[in-house]
Amino acid sequence: MKSKQLHNRIFAAAAAVALTLSMTACKSNTPTASTTAAPATTAETTTAAPETTQAPEGIYKAGTYTASAPGLKGDVTVEVTFTADALEKVEITDHQETPGIGTNAVDKLPDEIVKTQSLGVDAVAGATITSDAILAAVADCVAQAGGDAEALKAVKAETTTEKTAENLSADLVIIGGGAAGMTACMRAEELDLSVILVEKMPFMGGAISISGGNQVVMGSDLQKNAGVTDDSVQSMYEDFMKNGADLNVPELLTLYAEHVGETSDWLQAQGVTFDTEGGLHQLAEYSHDRELAYTGSGAGAAEAMRQAIAATDATVLLETRAAELLTDENGAVTGVKASSDSTDYTIEAKAVLIATGGYGNNKELLTEEMQQALYYGPVSSTGDGVIMATAEGIDADTRLMEYGKRYPNGIEVSQGIAKSTIGGNITGWTMSAILVNSQGQRVVNEKASNRTILETELKQEGQMLYLLMDEETFSVWKTKLGGAGISQEDIDGYLKLNGSAAPVFIHGDSLEEVAETAGMDPDTLKATVDTYNGYVQSGKDEEFGRPADFMTMEIGDGPYYLVEQKPRFATTMGGLVVNDLLEVQNTSAKTITGLYAAGEVIGGVMGDDSPSGANNGWAVTSGKLAAEQIAKTLQP
């Protein structure tokens, strides 16, 4: 795609950003800064609110009531105290929601419900499922107390917001609070730079907080301590080039490979820990074992970073959306304009770092092919950084915008939306799980690269495979999905549907039963299992070459389970053009003074596809390197 045509698409996409982000709110009449586009340049001083409807008085049976509703990671339990005519107190007494994301709803909604005497309050952006659980549980308590929950959903609080203008300044302003932005903030503060971080969501975390939580640690002490001492920059470079179809930008890939090890070790000093007991993952994409999981998955890493930033002097502006880059008469970037519900900010800075993530949740920036894949990334990935940097007057260049990282292991939890089973699959391959197509046949080595499995999956009927598991494997597999937001309650619900609706979770006491439910030929599925079990006994997969170390268990007794596996994506491969100092380049191949980028917003390091653990590794590595380069540039 030519640059001019691409820029036209980017400008058109800016109008779609606000609509896309509205997915994070539920039935709200009062927009928030994180779910709407930035205000126009003319200041608005008052936000009109809907006419207030008062809740009826004297309708409750005074007392304290308890109820629960399913959240993202399990039941959310509330305790609500009523007087005869009011909700006096709402308290969350039990939950397992993600720290820094779901817990934002836990912290904010109870007081908002009491303050407004309403169940029509806005969901907390990025924590819609938790918000819905809290509101549903409180509604249950209202019903127990004899109240009318539906009437309370219509109650809206009258709010008048006086907009103020504020001028701020810092050495560095970081746009985006995902892994790259948080890492850059931590390192810049360590290097004595004053930092302002602007994040449009109500929390820092971005994509890493909902990722499986794996990271490339090549060259680190972590890798060496796990027994791998012969890995190298060259080996990683070659593996990534092969996986990315040789479309990777050589200087960026080299930069990544040379520095990811030291970055991994540095992260530990900041409080980010790794699951060393689980050990390095053996993956087909890599010639050496170089991937390790964070303790507590991606959510655990994000929480550790938030705590590290809280211990610094950095200014963090949440629910504040960056709208426009500021420049001087020479075209150098000198700051940013941003806006929250209450404040319009003009932030002057000696350097600006764009760390806004990808554009997977903005269909205007996706090719038709990518629009067909299930999306499982953050709602905040709407391409803000690309849109700002390619605006007229900045004219940043982009590359590889047509590519996105697709994985073969998604389940369709709602129309067009996926969740990942990769955490369970990694364990399933160590047991007896196999992949079969709609005819009940194995068609691929389950321990092949994600790219190979995806390419095979795309050729199948409905572009889908099935994960086949016996009872022993399934009982372990399902416990590994919590990090991807798939709870036991979710699984129970999917099993109850038994394949009648997506996501397909078919179960039956015999192979014949699950085959018939799935529309497969029972004899074919039975023959597939018998053949695979024979390979386990002989220690050699004659058809597809699954490694013997991952064929130690035969497929045993039922019940049996078939779980859909569909293409999913969250991460985009394209983005801004930068040099090896992470300085953004314009369409004339010249450096834009004062403007840097880090993380997914950069295009090219992965080529057309990223191997497992690569995106988190690049985010933290590029964030750290960008902060170091900025500090070096700003030295007198």
Image (spheres, grey):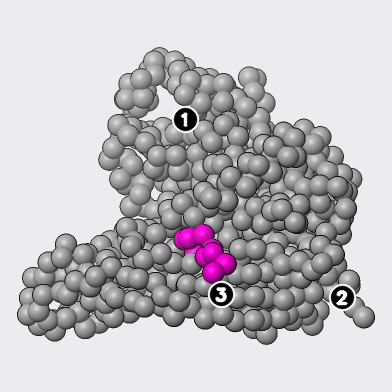
- Assign the magenta stretch its main secondary structure: loop
Task: Examine the rendered structure and indicate whether residue 93 appears above or below residue 250.
Answer: below
User: Upstream in the sequence, badge 3 or badge 2?
Assistant: 3
Question: What residue range appears in magenta?
Answer: 34-42
10 Å crowding of disc 3: few (<14), some (14-19), many (20+)? many
Q: Which residue is mark 2?
A: 634
Label 1 secondary element:
strand
10 Å crowding of disc 1: few (<14), some (14-19), many (20+)? many
Q: Tell me the kind of residue under disc 1.
A: Tyr
Is residue 117 one of those drawn in magenta?
no
Q: Is residue 296 left or right of residue 136?
A: right
The x, y position of residue 565, in whole percent, is 49, 34
Marks 3/2: CA distance? 27 Å
Label 2 secondary element:
helix
Front of the two marks 3 and 2: 3
Marks 1/2: CA distance? 54 Å
- Residue at image position (79%, 82%) is 192
Q: Nearer the viewer, residue 273 or 45?
A: 45
Q: Which residue is mark 3?
A: 344
10 Å crowding of disc 2: few (<14), some (14-19), many (20+)? some
Q: Nearer the viewer, residue 613 or 574?
A: 574
Residue 548 in view of the camera: no
Task: Examine the rendered structure and indicate whether residue 506 appears above or below residue 578.
Answer: above
Front of the two marks 1 and 2: 2
Return the mark for residue 466. Answer: 1
